[in-house]
Protein backbone atom coordinates (compact mmCIF):
# COMPACT_ATOMS: atom_id res chain seq x y z
CA UNK A 1 0.00 0.00 0.00
CA UNK A 2 1.41 3.36 -1.01
CA UNK A 3 2.15 5.67 1.92
CA UNK A 4 0.34 8.97 1.51
CA UNK A 5 2.48 12.13 1.44
CA UNK A 6 1.24 14.54 4.04
CA UNK A 7 2.56 16.65 6.89
CA UNK A 8 2.69 13.71 9.30
CA UNK A 9 4.56 11.33 6.99
CA UNK A 10 7.03 14.04 5.94
CA UNK A 11 7.68 14.83 9.58
CA UNK A 12 8.33 11.16 10.35
CA UNK A 13 10.55 10.81 7.29
CA UNK A 14 12.79 13.75 8.21
CA UNK A 15 12.84 12.65 11.85
CA UNK A 16 14.34 9.27 11.00
CA UNK A 17 16.22 10.11 7.77
CA UNK A 18 17.76 13.52 8.49
CA UNK A 19 21.24 11.99 8.64
CA UNK A 20 21.02 10.97 4.97
CA UNK A 21 20.46 14.58 3.92
CA UNK A 22 23.28 15.79 6.17
CA UNK A 23 25.61 13.13 4.74
CA UNK A 24 24.60 14.05 1.18
CA UNK A 25 25.34 17.72 1.86
CA UNK A 26 28.76 16.88 3.29
CA UNK A 27 29.60 14.61 0.35
CA UNK A 28 28.51 17.29 -2.12
CA UNK A 29 30.73 19.82 -0.40
CA UNK A 30 33.78 17.56 -0.49
CA UNK A 31 33.16 16.59 -4.12
CA UNK A 32 32.85 20.25 -5.08
CA UNK A 33 36.03 21.09 -3.16
CA UNK A 34 37.89 18.20 -4.82
CA UNK A 35 36.67 19.24 -8.26
CA UNK A 36 37.76 22.82 -7.66
CA UNK A 37 41.17 21.71 -6.39
CA UNK A 38 41.77 19.48 -9.41
CA UNK A 39 40.52 21.91 -12.04
CA UNK A 40 41.71 25.23 -10.56
CA UNK A 41 44.38 26.95 -12.68
CA UNK A 42 47.88 26.51 -11.25
CA UNK A 43 50.95 28.65 -11.74
CA UNK A 44 53.86 26.60 -13.14
CA UNK A 45 56.69 25.95 -10.67
CA UNK A 46 59.17 27.99 -12.71
CA UNK A 47 56.92 31.07 -12.49
CA UNK A 48 56.39 31.18 -8.72
CA UNK A 49 58.45 31.35 -5.55
CA UNK A 50 57.29 30.06 -2.16
CA UNK A 51 59.03 30.72 1.13
CA UNK A 52 57.90 28.42 3.94
CA UNK A 53 58.60 29.49 7.52
CA UNK A 54 58.28 26.71 10.08
CA UNK A 55 57.69 29.09 12.97
CA UNK A 56 55.17 31.34 14.62
CA UNK A 57 55.22 34.90 13.40
CA UNK A 58 53.41 37.84 11.85
CA UNK A 59 53.31 37.75 8.06
CA UNK A 60 53.31 41.55 7.61
CA UNK A 61 57.11 42.02 7.70
CA UNK A 62 58.03 39.18 5.33
CA UNK A 63 55.08 39.93 3.02
CA UNK A 64 56.14 43.56 2.71
CA UNK A 65 59.72 42.56 1.99
CA UNK A 66 58.77 40.01 -0.68
CA UNK A 67 56.30 42.39 -2.31
CA UNK A 68 59.07 44.98 -2.66
CA UNK A 69 61.51 42.44 -4.13
CA UNK A 70 58.83 41.19 -6.49
CA UNK A 71 57.98 44.67 -7.72
CA UNK A 72 61.52 46.00 -8.09
CA UNK A 73 63.76 43.06 -8.96
CA UNK A 74 61.80 39.89 -9.78
CA UNK A 75 58.71 41.07 -11.65
CA UNK A 76 59.16 38.25 -14.17
CA UNK A 77 58.03 35.83 -11.45
CA UNK A 78 54.24 35.48 -11.49
CA UNK A 79 53.83 34.71 -7.77
CA UNK A 80 56.05 35.28 -4.75
CA UNK A 81 54.54 34.27 -1.42
CA UNK A 82 55.45 33.40 2.16
CA UNK A 83 53.58 30.86 4.23
CA UNK A 84 53.91 30.02 7.91
CA UNK A 85 53.72 26.37 8.99
CA UNK A 86 52.78 26.11 12.66
CA UNK A 87 55.62 24.32 14.53
CA UNK A 88 53.69 22.04 16.88
CA UNK A 89 54.94 18.51 17.52
CA UNK A 90 51.94 16.71 16.04
CA UNK A 91 50.20 18.16 13.01
CA UNK A 92 52.92 20.74 12.38
CA UNK A 93 55.62 18.14 11.88
CA UNK A 94 53.29 16.15 9.63
CA UNK A 95 52.48 19.18 7.47
CA UNK A 96 56.17 20.05 7.14
CA UNK A 97 57.06 16.46 6.20
CA UNK A 98 54.24 16.38 3.63
CA UNK A 99 55.43 19.61 2.01
CA UNK A 100 58.99 18.36 1.94
CA UNK A 101 58.19 14.96 0.46
CA UNK A 102 55.81 16.49 -2.09
CA UNK A 103 58.56 18.81 -3.31
CA UNK A 104 56.58 21.94 -2.43
CA UNK A 105 58.25 25.22 -1.57
CA UNK A 106 61.44 26.79 -2.86
CA UNK A 107 63.04 28.36 0.22
CA UNK A 108 62.57 27.22 3.82
CA UNK A 109 63.30 28.91 7.13
CA UNK A 110 63.62 26.13 9.70
CA UNK A 111 64.63 25.65 13.35
CA UNK A 112 67.79 23.69 14.10
CA UNK A 113 66.26 20.23 14.66
CA UNK A 114 64.17 20.26 11.50
CA UNK A 115 67.05 21.69 9.47
CA UNK A 116 69.49 19.03 10.64
CA UNK A 117 67.02 16.22 9.99
CA UNK A 118 66.18 17.20 6.41
CA UNK A 119 69.70 18.35 5.57
CA UNK A 120 70.98 14.91 6.56
CA UNK A 121 68.57 13.43 4.03
CA UNK A 122 70.00 15.63 1.27
CA UNK A 123 66.78 17.57 0.73
CA UNK A 124 68.48 20.96 0.44
CA UNK A 125 70.71 22.53 -2.18
CA UNK A 126 74.43 22.48 -1.33
CA UNK A 127 75.02 26.22 -0.93
CA UNK A 128 78.80 25.78 -0.92
CA UNK A 129 78.46 24.85 -4.60
CA UNK A 130 76.81 28.19 -5.43
CA UNK A 131 79.41 30.78 -6.34
CA UNK A 132 80.01 33.52 -3.80
CA UNK A 133 77.54 32.46 -1.09
CA UNK A 134 80.17 31.44 1.46
CA UNK A 135 82.21 34.56 0.74
CA UNK A 136 79.22 36.85 1.25
CA UNK A 137 78.56 35.39 4.70
CA UNK A 138 82.20 35.27 5.75
CA UNK A 139 82.79 38.89 4.68
CA UNK A 140 79.81 39.89 6.83
CA UNK A 141 81.22 38.05 9.83
CA UNK A 142 78.48 35.37 9.84
CA UNK A 143 79.60 32.03 11.27
CA UNK A 144 78.13 29.45 8.88
CA UNK A 145 79.83 26.39 10.36
CA UNK A 146 76.55 25.25 11.94
CA UNK A 147 75.00 25.09 8.47
CA UNK A 148 77.35 22.31 7.33
CA UNK A 149 75.84 18.82 7.55
CA UNK A 150 76.71 15.34 6.29
CA UNK A 151 74.47 13.75 3.67
CA UNK A 152 73.53 10.35 5.10
CA UNK A 153 73.34 8.75 1.65
CA UNK A 154 76.57 10.03 0.12
CA UNK A 155 78.64 10.72 3.23
CA UNK A 156 79.54 14.13 1.75
CA UNK A 157 79.50 17.24 3.91
CA UNK A 158 77.95 20.41 2.50
CA UNK A 159 76.62 23.80 3.51
CA UNK A 160 72.89 23.09 3.40
CA UNK A 161 71.59 26.08 5.37
CA UNK A 162 72.55 29.56 6.56
CA UNK A 163 72.15 30.49 10.25
CA UNK A 164 70.06 33.66 10.39
CA UNK A 165 70.16 34.90 14.00
CA UNK A 166 72.87 37.46 13.18
CA UNK A 167 71.22 38.67 10.00
CA UNK A 168 69.13 41.82 9.77
CA UNK A 169 65.36 41.56 9.13
CA UNK A 170 65.08 37.76 9.09
CA UNK A 171 64.83 37.31 12.90
CA UNK A 172 61.89 39.76 12.88
CA UNK A 173 59.95 37.42 10.58
CA UNK A 174 59.42 34.88 13.39
CA UNK A 175 58.87 34.67 17.14
CA UNK A 176 61.76 32.22 17.46
CA UNK A 177 63.67 34.58 19.76
CA UNK A 178 67.10 33.22 20.61
CA UNK A 179 66.44 29.95 18.75
CA UNK A 180 68.59 29.63 15.65
CA UNK A 181 66.79 29.46 12.30
CA UNK A 182 68.31 28.27 9.02
CA UNK A 183 67.58 29.51 5.51
CA UNK A 184 67.67 26.73 2.91
CA UNK A 185 66.74 26.01 -0.73
CA UNK A 186 64.70 22.87 -1.40
CA UNK A 187 66.23 20.52 -4.00
CA UNK A 188 64.20 19.65 -7.10
CA UNK A 189 61.90 22.63 -6.58
CA UNK A 190 61.47 23.25 -10.32
CA UNK A 191 62.71 26.81 -9.98
CA UNK A 192 66.39 26.66 -9.01
CA UNK A 193 67.41 29.81 -10.86
CA UNK A 194 64.83 32.09 -9.24
CA UNK A 195 65.24 30.45 -5.81
CA UNK A 196 68.97 31.12 -5.92
CA UNK A 197 68.36 34.70 -7.09
CA UNK A 198 65.98 35.36 -4.19
CA UNK A 199 68.47 33.87 -1.71
CA UNK A 200 71.20 36.20 -2.98
CA UNK A 201 68.87 39.21 -2.72
CA UNK A 202 67.93 38.28 0.85
CA UNK A 203 71.60 37.95 1.78
CA UNK A 204 72.45 41.26 0.13
CA UNK A 205 69.71 43.00 2.12
CA UNK A 206 70.16 41.19 5.44
CA UNK A 207 73.87 40.66 5.97
CA UNK A 208 75.24 43.10 8.57
CA UNK A 209 78.19 44.36 6.50
CA UNK A 210 75.86 45.54 3.74
CA UNK A 211 73.75 47.56 6.15
CA UNK A 212 76.83 49.08 7.74
CA UNK A 213 78.22 49.97 4.32
CA UNK A 214 74.98 51.73 3.37
CA UNK A 215 74.92 53.65 6.69
CA UNK A 216 78.51 54.76 6.23
CA UNK A 217 77.78 55.94 2.71
CA UNK A 218 74.84 58.02 3.94
CA UNK A 219 76.86 59.53 6.82
CA UNK A 220 79.73 60.47 4.55
Image (cartoon, grey):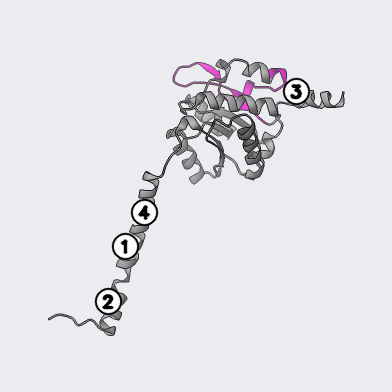
**Horizontal and vertical percent position of residue 172:** 69, 39
Which residue, given by chain and number where applicable, does mark 4 sit on? 32
Q: Rounded to the nearest whole Å, what is the CA distance between mark 2 and mark 1?
A: 16 Å
Nearest-to-viewer mark from 4 and 2:
4
Q: Which element type, helix, strand or loop, lies under badge 3?
A: helix
Give the residue displayed 49% in from the left and 21% down from the top: 151
**Left or right: 194 in relation to 135:** left
Residue where numbered disc 3 is placed: 209
Q: Which mark is residue 13?
A: 2
Marked residue nearer the N-terminal end (4 or 2): 2
On-image quarter of the N terminus: bottom left
For residue 159: magenta? yes
Q: Earlier in the sequence, mark 2 or mark 1?
A: 2
Query: Which residue is located at x 58 percent, y 34 percent?
Result: 110
Q: Are marks 4 and 3 in contact (CB under 8 Å)?
A: no
- Say if 68 sits above or below 31 in the image: above
**In the rendered view, does 101 fall on the left or right side of 110?**
left
Q: How packed is label 1: few (under 14 Cα within 10 Å), some, or many (20 or more)? A: few
Q: Badges 4 and 2: C-beta atoms under 8 Å apart? A: no
Instruction: State how far apart marks 1 and 3 are (Cα).
Output: 62 Å
Q: CA distance from mark 4 to mark 3?
A: 53 Å
Q: Which residue is mark 1?
A: 24
Residue range in magenta is 138-164
| Percent of width and height locating residue 176 | 65, 40
Amino acid sequence: MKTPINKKTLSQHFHYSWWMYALSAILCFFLWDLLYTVTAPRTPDNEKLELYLYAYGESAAVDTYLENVHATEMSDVTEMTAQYLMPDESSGLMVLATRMMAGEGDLFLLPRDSFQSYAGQGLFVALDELEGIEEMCENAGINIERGWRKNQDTGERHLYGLPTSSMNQIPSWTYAGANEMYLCIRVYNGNDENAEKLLRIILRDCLPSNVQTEENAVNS
